[in-house]
Image: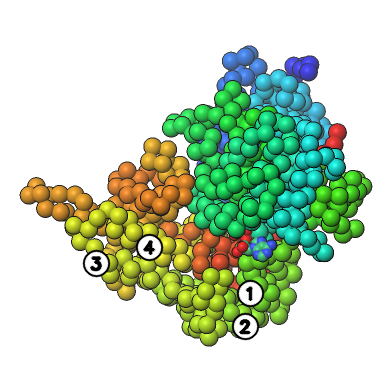
Amino acid sequence: MSKTRHTDQQFALDLGPTDPDPGTEPGTRSAPAALADVEAMAAVLESWQELGWLRPLDLGFARLIQTLSAEQGESVPALVLLMAALVSHQVGRGHVCIDLGQLLADANGTLALPPDDAPLGPSEPGEAPITPGQLLQSASLPSFLSSLDRAFAVSDGSLTTPLVLTGQRLYLRRFWRYEQQIAAGIKHRLGLASALADPDSPASVTLGQALVTLFGRQSEVDYQQLACALAARHRFAVITGGPGTGKTTTVVRLLAALQAIAGHTGDRGGRKYRIRLAAPTGKAAARLNESIAGAVRKLPFDQLPGQVGPDDIPTRVTTLHRLLGSRPDTRQFRHHRDNPLPVDILVVDEASMVDVDLMASLFDALPASAQLILLGDKDQLASVDAGAVLGELCRRAEQAHYTPATARWLAAVTGQHLPESLVDDQGQPLDQAVAMLRTSFRFGAGSGIGQLAQAVNTNSLAPSMLAACRDGQFDDVIWLNGAGPAEPERTLALVAEHALAGSPQAFRQGGEGRVGPTGPLAPPVGYRHYLRLLADHELIASSSRAQWDELARQVLEAFADFQVLCALRKGPWGVEGLNELIARQLLAHRLIPRTEGWYPGRPVLVTGNDYNLGLMNGDVGIAIEVPWDRDAEGRAKPTLRVAFPGGDGTEAIRWISPSRLQQLETVYAMTVHKSQGSEFNHTCLVLPDRLSPVLTRELVYTGITRARNWFSLITGDAGVFNASVQQRVVRASGLAERLSPD
Ligand SMILES: Nc1ncnc2c1ncn2[C@@H]1O[C@H](COP(=O)(O)OP(=O)(O)OP(=O)(O)O)[C@@H](O)[C@H]1O
């Protein structure tokens, strides 16, 4: 790429007429100056940071580019300074890049600036801060692109520039590389030859026999069976489905089928595959651990071809960080391309939570021929950090787009015929490796949770559905204040009351008489339940560690019976306000001794990985008073320890001194984002009294589907529920495009 020297003035000119009619809008008068002069631009960025519009990190990154360029004898154009800060800002909001076309069409909307909750600064009209929209209002895309293209800090990736421009997407170099690594890893695997490509090959015939054994012969299309067949055929596959659609069941059967054909594929010399199971968080790993052992026990090993035994299917699930070998104080994992994972097949559950950084590390650590199977719910919220990898890979999953060749192969191997609507002669390679499960086995036809989740997901919330939730027509769903006026004080009092006891009386028949898959269901309970269990225990100083472990297990389990979820962090409707509100209610009922600091019964959520303690972001623990310390006379002295469930699904309890815990928060209320990968017997979703960009369909859907048996909704304003469902999470990224055929 050849670069010509340029001046800041040239960049300003390239952007077209930036001298709007002075005085038309406050702030616009400084736009041309800022675009023409790097120091003027730096002043604008600084003012944005002071207003809280940008993070210090965003400004720091822009300044770093300026310093590095100066060291090279180059002056950074004002435009590059601006874009460096804005791309960094967007990454902080979960985007992988900025789509410049979108930016120029609606800069303020694309950047969510000014933020809803940010102070607007001085109220004098002439002094109002300039907005990105005003700054970029007269820029045209072609001149914008060519200006960036000529800047020294920008390249198409072939030079080691801090910013990368591909098409009209502008990336921070690191994120461009992640996306490239992921796309290359997927494309490489989709291109590998498969012993199953020929439906008459011995491997395909054995696969067909295994599938009949596992699923029986069926007249109707069985999407679980199709998913198994498609995923077996590719070294990269995605199985997506809503809650209870059988992702775990399907993947266990898939692994059994793969082990059945291991002898035919040549790559293991007849030996069984080395399989590992992983999930992004400790909670998600623990949940899969619980369900996978049961699914493995149900496998008909004695009837499967290929001599598959229980030991051939792993039941232990690890976190991705442990699998990759995270090390304290470094982002580098122990496993990477020069020290790949010793694995032939890797299954990653809850893949919607995996961001581009971690996904790229995963591809880097996988042997080139290893098979990767991603499981997850494409409709859930995307990862907390940048990217929406699973969502992007599943963009076309609903309509499938299987080619006629795939349809013929499926018919030959499974005997099943795809509906015409899922066949497309323009189907792309990735489409052939994505399978969607379409029937929920968890929620029966009458389940309010299932119906409400479906209606939210498909944006078809009919008035009758809302009325059914309000009037308690479902056994398992109640909109607690859906019928009445929503005065903030009354509503928050309702949240506090509900958190205490779970409001069984609000559910149909007082929540009595329901039967779940494993027997009668107890009515909802609220937080009082686990606190009573903790207060009423009869353990004494001489009780064994095993007895204390058992108590901790019961208390942790009882705590997971109920969870208040919310959308925001700050304010009365956010985690902070609700935690305080609920703690005060529990104190008023003498269930906890205080609301501040450490006390017995305080539930905490770990908010960052702590490799030294073996705690992962998302782990939940409860403070329990134990008699293990001694005073000067050698007598037992009560002391607080925080009990966490054992990592990697072990039964052991980890007891950790509160003083060693660095990153945590009280968790009577949890954001929906943090609840991903977890499930609770009863969840209560609290939505605020005003719409904000955080409130989206994905958030509401994720909140509802965290509930296994009971779901309650409390809204600051009834209209916010419906309005949230209209808003979507859209994350800028180029992954889907990179995976399209060239
Ligand atoms: N084909 C099937 N026929 C009958 N029951 C099934 C079938 N597949 C799964 N189930 C049952 O449905 C329930 C949910 O299945 P599974 O745990 O596999 O789903 P999942 O998609 O992994 O769930 P989750 O969303 O909780 O992760 C289980 O009780 C399972 O035994």
Q: CA distance from mark 4 to mark 1?
A: 29 Å
Residue that numbered label 4 is attached to: 554
Distance in Å between CA atoms under marks 4 and 3: 13 Å
* Closer to viewer: mark 2 or mark 3: 3
Q: Amino acid at mark 1?
A: Gly
Q: Amino acid at mark 3?
A: Glu
Q: Nearer the viewer, residue 6 or 249?
A: 249
Residue 538: give its label: 3
Label 1 with label 3: CB-CB less than 8 Å: no
Q: Is residue 499 left or right of residue 206?
A: left
Residue 217 on image: x %, y %: 78, 60
Q: Locate residue 71: give its quadrant.
A: top right
> Mark 1 near ligand 1 (CB under 8 Å)?
no
Of callouts 4 and 1, which one flags the residue occurring earlier in the amino acid sequence? 1
- Location of mark 2 (residue): 473
Q: Position of residue 53 (x, y in %)?
A: 57, 45
Amino acid on which disc 4 is placed: Gln
Q: Are marks 4 and 1 in contact (CB under 8 Å)?
A: no
Residue at mark 1 to residue at mark 3: CA–CA distance? 40 Å
For image coordinates 65% across by 44% down, the residue present is 307
Look at the image and tell me whether residue 610 can be seen. Answer: yes
Read off the residue under disc 1. Answer: 448
Q: Residue at x 41, y 52 (%)?
A: 651
Q: Residues within 10 Å of mark 1 (few under 14, many from 20)?
A: many
SS under mark 2: loop
| Residue occupying image coordinates x 74% and y 53% | 211
